[in-house]
Image (tube, rainbow, N blue to C red):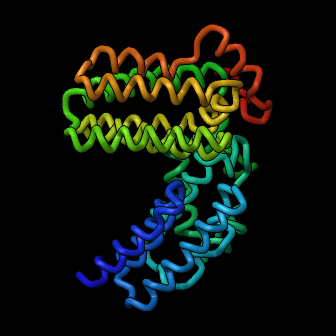
Amino acid sequence: MRRNQCLNEKIMSTRQFPLYAETIFLHARLSLKHSLPMQKTSDAFKSATSAAKAIKAKGEAGALLKTGVLKTGALKGPTLKDEVVRLIEEEIISGALPPGTRLDEVQLSARFGLSRTPLREALAQLTASGLLEARPRSGTFVTRLGIKSILECLAMTAEIEAIAAEWASRRMSDDEIRGLRAMHEACGAAEKTGSSDSYFLANRRFHAGIYAGAHNRYVAETANFLFMRAAPYRRLQLRQPGRIRSSSAEHGAIVDAIAAREGETAKRIMRDHILIQGDRFMEFISMLPDSFIGLKTD
């Protein structure tokens, strides 16, 4: 009980770094999961806080994995594989590992303090999920999608998130809606920074709030899966001139529709929010780096 209370107090103290609090929470949670003594829990929290501050100061999405937080020797056993999967997922989503990047097993093994066997298990899990692809005699790479696959993924995302918004309008409690509105306000604050990376993080939490508000774990799991697959490409959308401003405005309309319990309206706005149509489609295609696009025809 005492340990949980201390952890909660420490997590609350991270509010000055709202965009990175979940990073701190992840590593503090790991300390509890592995039942570390209180002193080690405190040390792990301090290391995680330093990592979060490094990300905040440098604006580097990959700073966490460069700090060596996981190399304390405190985390052992099969569950570490799951956390490595989570951290690699985060690097892919954040753009620190862009599509087409080759993953070096030796470097990753040294970074995480893992033997090759659990690391390969983690990479195999990510390959099975589609985030990575194994190329014979070449290695393991972050998956690159062809244009058709990108558009198919975004089209499916639009439908799933539209359903989530419709169901959220019927199922979210008033408190949950207030929480969603706070997430929208956080997007507005990120918009003012002019940083597409900051906005992307706030935007991600906003959409996750709607997934949760649908109160259906299959919708949430599917939406999260599709989000991860398309994340590197959705990040690029936010670099289109005026897109962050229009995205934030669309969020406001979605929240208002959910709060008014207008499911069909929330569904329509969310679908249009995700889909790439007309001039936006041409602008999006022109922004895609060649390295982001798969060479194979799809």
Taking the image as shown, residue 167 lies to the left or right of residue 63, namely left
Taking the image as shown, residue 148 lies to the left or right of residue 139, namely left
Residue placed at 45% from the left, 88% from the top? Answer: 40
Taking the image as shown, residue 122 lies to the left or right of residue 77, namely right
Residue placed at 60% from the left, 25% from the top? Answer: 150
- Where residue 232 sits, quadrant-wise, is top right
x and y percentages locating residue 73 in the rendered image: 54, 85
x and y percentages locating residue 120 in the rendered image: 57, 62
Work out which residue is located at the far top of the displayed protein and give it: 278
Taking the image as shown, residue 15 lies to the left or right of residue 211, namely right
Residue 114 is at least partly visible in this image: no
x and y percentages locating residue 187 in the rendered image: 51, 40
Residue 10, compared with residue 132, is above or below; it is below
Residue 66, compared with residue 233, is above or below; it is below
Which corner quadrant holds the N terminus? bottom left
x and y percentages locating residue 162 in the rendered image: 37, 22
Residue 292, compared with residue 264, is above or below; it is below
Residue 241 is at least partly visible in this image: yes
Residue placed at 29% from the left, 14% from the top? Answer: 264
Camera-side residue of 201 and 191 = 191
Work out which residue is located at the far right of the displayed protein and give it: 290
